Amino acid sequence: MIPARKLRLLTTATIGLALTASAALASTSQTALDAFAAHLGYRYTVLNNQAGPNDFTSELDLTLPDAAIPQDWSLYFGMVNAVKSSDSDVFDLTHINGDLYRLTPRPGVTLRPGATYAITLTAEGHYYSRFHALPNAYLAVDGLTPRVIAAARASYDPATQMEDLPFVAPMTDAAKLEIANPQDQTRWLTPERAFAENVAHQAAFAPPTTIILPTPVSVTSLTGDTLDLKRGVRLSLSGLDHADIAAALKDGGWRETASGLPISISVTGQGAPDSYSLTAQKDRIIITAADSAGAFYALESLAQQARFEHERLKPLVITDAPRFAFRGLHLDLARNFESKAQILKIITVMGQEKLNKLHLHLGDDEGWRLAIDGLPELTEIGGRRCHDLSEDRCLLPELGAGPDGKSGVNGYLTRADYIDILKAAKARHIEVIPSLDMPGHSRAAIRSMEARARRLIAAGKPDEAAEYRLTDPDDKTVYDSIQHYDDNTLNVCMPSTYHFIDHVIDAIKAMHEAAGEPLRIYHIGTDETAGAWKDSPLCQKIMANEHLTPEQLGQRFIVKVANMLAAKGIEPAGWSDGMGAVDPAQLPKVVQSNSWGGLFAGGVASAQQQADQGWNVVLSTPDVLYFDMPYAADPNERGYDWASRQTPVFKVFAFLPDNLPANASVMKDTLNRPASIADTTPLTDGHRITGMQGQLWSETVRSPLIADYMLFPRVEALAERAWRKADWEPDYKPGQAYSYGDGQVDAAKLNADWSAFNVKLKARLATLDAEGIIYRLPPPGARLTGPRLTGAVLEANTAYGDLAIQYREHGGGWKSYKGPVAVRGPVDLRSVAPDGKRVSRTVTVK
């Protein structure tokens, strides 16, 4: 099986440019370079996704200003897909590292002012979305300050409040662009197809008595007068401290007053962890919880319902408990940084959604995002990307970071920032799980420590320089990582590597202790290790002495670090591919594995096998739970697509985490084909999945707006499935096989539950509006019936949230859609946020 994130690189391309000079001339001034960058035309067009067995072609057009052209310039751009060839008589292409490339005018070529030059690129994989392109292509001349090409910048759409990339040409030629593989049955989600899908998921349902999400196990309506919460609340507590629920009171907008509605909260220590019961009747509310987290969740549920009923609560009884103890969300801060403010906002929403694990991915190839005492280079260099090819000041400007190191994708968390995050999470009963990926995906750490070593060697301190070095200068191994780096893997044979890891873990452990939240789990990473060891003299000696292969050196590393963690009282965690390669007998007894194998690519067997050997298996299934995948198969939807070309909210809602083979009954494979899953590695009695986690990898997430869009409202569906098992989910039967549409999952019950969920989601979206979450607004589904010229009938719907819809004819003014309506000619449509301040992207039916 090809590792899933390897497929991402084989199937995704990203453009961003940098042109460099062969020899800087005094005649090229900063003013000339600035003017050239301001007026150079820059256009990227995807030509054909069927250029070869696994290739696509694209074209970069550079239109020179109709003025004097500076000399000795170069253009740097990022392209995640490996470029196989470039076709140009004018420019030479050089791969720098990772996704960074350089275009240089060929010696002796005379460039004509006003001319357009086309560079045709053939690259591996396919290119399905305009938003795979990277902004901030830039020009550089030796001795001058590099400048971003103005035409290569992203823009902002105030109507949708989202980023756009105006330099990327529209992708409209379905014959050449819609599919790359003839076996792929995926088709672009046109408004007509969206309309049909939305209808297919509708069903008759019993209106829910509450709008609480995730849905409680049991809700019973009572008779009697409503409870007036407008006067505030008056608490009496037993078995818990006010601090245990203070964040719920704050986030829910509760006012504590002497004359408020009495709320009695008791923690009994009985019942399942996180469980609670709530009775609201006769002008008082009684909450009984198993623990302080359960009391917190009771108040969060109460706040949702009270807000919906405008603080006049109808009498009711709620009995509730979670399905999984582990209900997680993963945020990748390493590729592109997210600020403390954004993380705190997400933590608040996680508390409301009853998610209780925050996995922070803080170190990878493109960035190190956590300050570590004694190693300032990790963040001073590893926390910033700029145009410094020596990487003495910063990392290479991968992923469209731009040349100046000032864009929002740069940055890091200070010690104080991290402690604040830990305290905010603890207040909402959320455990923070830090991760700094190793031994692969470690380029930011490696380059930072190399810069440190160069500085200390120059200062005459070679022993100090070697103390935390992560790569062997005598290692001649040539390798190519998943993201096309040739220098991103720790040398696992150097004692200094383990000294570095020990120092980092102790620093993080100290931060957790300072926050009053001990470090219980640390995520090593362990995935997609390219290896840098075959030709390392240090590794050759170990391999000879211990009779190991280069691959076994990676397993040796995992075992050693996992046991280092266990000795510190910390549970080791890692991704399932790396962890699964290790003999379980060599690992500590308690281990967590994040299972990221594809449903139809061996992931079911892998997850169940690891659960059966006694590990804590957390489902991180990329087909469903990677929220960096697009919501829909559409060239105007953002997100990578190696695991799934379409991960709508319904798909997340329909996931069956307790019965993984049964997902074949309701989901198609990555090529949108009906498929089967045989339960070849059944779970034995006493073993089960530990939990589930949604992931947001951030290669294409350059702002909080994009992060919000990709996360929400898929997070609401994630929370629903992590908290509640629905009545349409069949119980797991060892050895049972499933096939698409086989009826073993009751589609009518699933659709009815989805329809009821949508009623609750509508209220939840209004709350997200109030909290400033820029969640995705789905473009309407729509169809026209009848003659187009004399008057067709427009019908429209939305995928979720029962959002308002607007339409316009012939480019006229927007009108509110109230139901089927007669129209003429092409019609544009968009959905509208509940607060009316934002709209979806516009789609057209003809």
Image (cartoon, grey):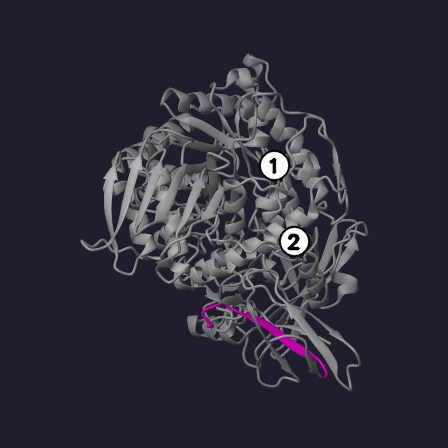
Callout 2 secondary element: loop
Residue at the spot of label 1: 479
Q: What is the count of numbered marks?
A: 2
Residue 476 x/y as whole percent: 56, 32
* Image point (53%, 65%), residue name: 73
Residue 693 x/y as whole percent: 51, 41
Residue type pointed to by label 2: Gln
Residue at the spot of label 2: 646
Callout 1 secondary element: loop
Q: Quadrant of residue 823?
A: bottom right
Q: Determine crowd level at label 1: few under 14, some 14-19, many 20+ residues with C-alpha closer than 10 A.
A: some
Q: CA distance from mark 2 to mark 1?
A: 33 Å
Residue 94 x/y as whole percent: 61, 53
Residue type pointed to by label 1: Tyr
Image side of residue 269 versus residue 629, left or right: left
Residue nearest the observer in this picture, 427 or 313: 313
Mark 2 or mark 1, earlier in chain: 1
Q: Quadrant of residue 663?
A: top right
Residue 496 x/y as whole percent: 40, 27
- Residue 786, can we see it? yes
Image side of residue 206 versus residue 415, left or right: right
Question: Which residue range is magenta in the image?
Answer: 824-836
